Amino acid sequence: MISLPLPPKVIKKNKHQSVFEIDGLYPGYGVTIGNSLRRVLLSSLEGVAVTEVKIKGVSHEFSTMEGVLEDAIMILLNLKNLRFKIHEGQTQKVRLLVKGEKKVTGADFKLFPQIVLANPELHIATITDKKTELDIEITIEKGIGYEPKDQRKIKKVASPLQANSEIGVIVLDAIFTPIKNVNFQVENMRVGDRTDFNKLSLEIETDGTITPQEAFYQATEILIKHFVLIFEGKSSEDLKIQTTKEGEIASEKPKTKKQTKTKDTKTKKAKK
């Protein structure tokens, strides 16, 4: 029988970056588990991205603005790097309105209580004229992974509610994932008389909207849900999975017809 590893432990921890270590993995399981977690972390966690931008006086991304140092393309690139967290709803609009000489940052956006900006210090633009006004409205949405703007435009055309876009709205490539980087390393270690067992070190770096610990357990939960479905052959509606704050996951397996029948037979005999 294949032995199970020790529970994961955190060997390095700060606000946006942590290293997790799993000792005692059966030979070959270090790469199997490390690669699976890495793929899920990079592709399947929910995040928030800037999907649309409307800048007053700008009709397309190749425009320039009088009194602003950066051109429209540079401002759009800066806006894409804003990392938000939405506590209510799937889509929100936020606005920035600044006038006069100023270095504009993410902190200049007026946010609703249900929206949090993880990097308010991010530079957006530089206004070089006292009379210049910078008016920007952005749309932020929840999503998974990466979605190119061409794909998003097709969705808008297909949706009757979104078919008529506002004039001057610039659609952006959406980078939803809250994960900035994931690396893993596998080393051999001794377990009993054997020296070919694996030690897995997994390094996770996030954008600040989620902690590395939350990301680790979310990715683990996604994998477990898929394996439980495969093992039990059940639909997602029938599957009941409970996740604790620590990330421990327990599944409830239904009784088979045979088990139910046996139980009923025993009950009838007891009554006699």
Image (cartoon, helix red, strand yellow):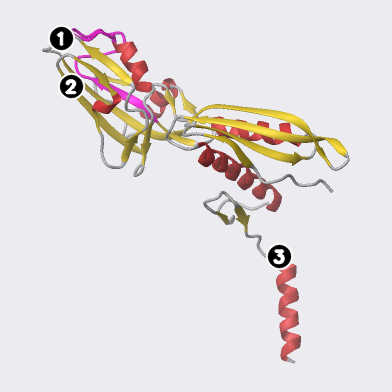
Mark 2 to mark 3: distance in Å? 66 Å
The answer to whether 139 appears left or right of 181 in the picture is left
Q: Is the magenta region chiefly helix, strand or loop?
A: loop
Question: Which amino acid type corresponds to the residue marked 3 in the rendered image?
Answer: Thr
Q: Residue, x 68% and y 28% (percent of image)?
A: 185
For residue 129, which numbered disc appears in the image? Answer: 1
Mark 3 to mark 1: distance in Å? 75 Å
Give, as a single range, the part of the protein colored magenta.
Answer: 49-71
- Within 10 Å of disc 1 (Cα), the crowding (few <14, some 14-19, many 20+) is some
Q: Secondary structure at mark 3?
A: loop
Kindly tell me whether residue 163 is visible in this rendering: no
| 66 part of magenta stretch | yes
Q: Secondary structure at mark 2?
A: strand
Closer to the camera: disc 2 or disc 3?
Answer: 2
Q: Residue, x 80% and y 47% (percent of image)?
A: 3
For residue 98, which numbered disc appears in the image? Answer: 2
